[in-house]
Image (cartoon, coloured by chain):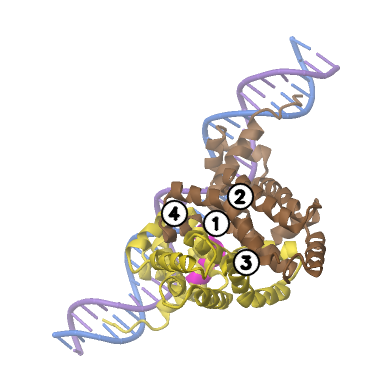
Chain colours: A yellow, B brown, C purple, D blue
Amino acid sequence: MKKEKNSTTENNILEAAKRVFQQKGLDGARMQEIADGASINKAMLHYYYRNKQLLFEAVFTNAFMLLAPQLNKILNDDSDIETKIKNFTSNYISFVSVHPYLPNFVIQEIHKNPDFIQKIKKNSEFPNLDKFKKQVDLEVEKGILKSISAEQLFINILSLSIFPFIGAHLIMAFVGVDDEGFQKILEERKTAVADFIIASIKK
Amino acid sequence: MKKEKNSTTENNILEAAKRVFQQKGLDGARMQEIADGASINKAMLHYYYRNKQLLFEAVFTNAFMLLAPQLNKILNDDSDIETKIKNFTSNYISFVSVHPYLPNFVIQEIHKNPDFIQKIKKNSEFPNLDKFKKQVDLEVEKGILKSISAEQLFINILSLSIFPFIGAHLIMAFVGVDDEGFQKILEERKTAVADFIIASIKK
DNA sequence: AGATTTGTTAACCATTTGGTTAAACTAAAT
DNA sequence: ATTTAGTTTAACCAAATGGTTAACAAATCT
């Protein structure tokens, strides 16, 4: 038996599957297209991944696990809130600029199949708000921050960081810029988002 | 010839199509399911709407045209920025709470087919930023607002208003609340979002 | 080397799916 | 009453699609 056959084939499949699934979604994706993308026979897909659903779940979990660590940065490290916000927004926007399809993909498929997230929540360390909440409450108490609920603040941070990627085309149409112009706006946001948030909550 | 046959059938079709398309997307939707939902034969669908694409476009345009007027509120009326922000965020969150599927549907299909938005941009009055931009620049100049670009502010407003609906399931998982708890958070946001924005930009 | 497991292919299959056809039905217009 | 035009149905169809089979090639093991 060949063991170290991690080589190309399986990787090619995952790469191709990622491309196709992220662009077209579970329903829109075609196994044939993925096979073509991986330069293999369609039967090979079913050799490596028994069926479409399993292949999809592999890709999805992969994508999700790429985003989760980003969130742990804001939820579970020890710096103060202001620093965290600066780091997270900047890092996140930089990171997603390199993987622009990720947020849409993850969010869309969770939307169509909300149970999916429960499955993931059980495995691995799923980020939770406990520490962040304690921290915010403390800084509010200390008078460092204005009164705000950690939940609302968290939602605001996520919204400002993620939405521009999800609504990119919509925003471009409204604002009247092309891809290049939009890139500039995103670049600005790497610092502008944190400034915006901090201006609002810092006493 | 029966002329006033606007009666139920066509309406049933649109209602059923709306339900199915919004839940499953263009690719995931099945003509048979729409037919069943409208209590008609599948052939009737093709009698009223020649094919899936056209039926979809009817539903999509419909949905989009429901959201556009909301945006005109913030872009093209005469009140000052602060008032506009208060009105828009509150109205938008209220409105979408009643149509929670809308933002996801519109954004997702635009994401998969960006040309779609160009089609719409040509018909009807498509909201644009010109007036809003002038107003923001003026209030910045007057010293009412801190220095901020109208584009970034606009994106922030949209993000904070729309994302919670698109990322609902994700947020619920992170924050650790159920549907009911999330409803409460949204209710809070009807005022909290505007307060958050204004605290950040008002001098 | 010979057996066995693993990787790969081409051809095939059952089902689903969007879409069509032709005929029947309905109600108004002549 | 018969024509006419719109409405509705059941049966049908071709293409697409996810998935399988069986045979073959290439490693791996003994």
Query: Residue beneath label 2, please?
Result: B93
Main SS class of the magenta portion in the image: helix
Residue in the image at 54% along x and 48% along y = B187
Query: Residue beneath label 3, please?
Result: A164
Which circle, 3 or 1, is nearer the viewer?
A: 1
Asked if the residue under mark 2 is in contact with the one under mark 3, i.e. CB atoms within 8 Å, the reply is no
Asked if the residue under mark 1 is in contact with the one under mark 4, i.e. CB atoms within 8 Å, the reply is no
Real-space Cα separation, disc 4 to disc 1, in angstroms: 15 Å
Q: Chain of mark 2?
A: B
Image quadrant in which the N terminus of chain A is located: bottom left
Real-space Cα separation, disc 3 to disc 2, in angstroms: 18 Å
Q: Chain of mark 1?
A: B
Q: Which residues are magenta?
A: A17-28
Label 4, secondary structure: give it: loop
Foreground pick, B87 / A13: B87
Residue B34: image location, x then y, percent: 56, 40
Label 3, secondary structure: give it: helix
Amino acid found under the numbered disc labelled 2: Ile
Q: Chain of mark 4?
A: A
Locate residue A112 relative to residue B159 in the image: left or right: left
Mark 2 vs mark 4: same chain?
no
Q: Does residue B97 belong to the magenta stretch?
A: no
Amino acid found under the numbered disc labelled 3: Pro
Q: Residues within 10 Å of mark 2 (few under 14, many from 20)?
A: many
Against C9, residue C13 (above or below) is above
Label 2, secondary structure: give it: helix
Asked if the residue under mark 1 is in contact with the one under mark 3, i.e. CB atoms within 8 Å, the reply is no
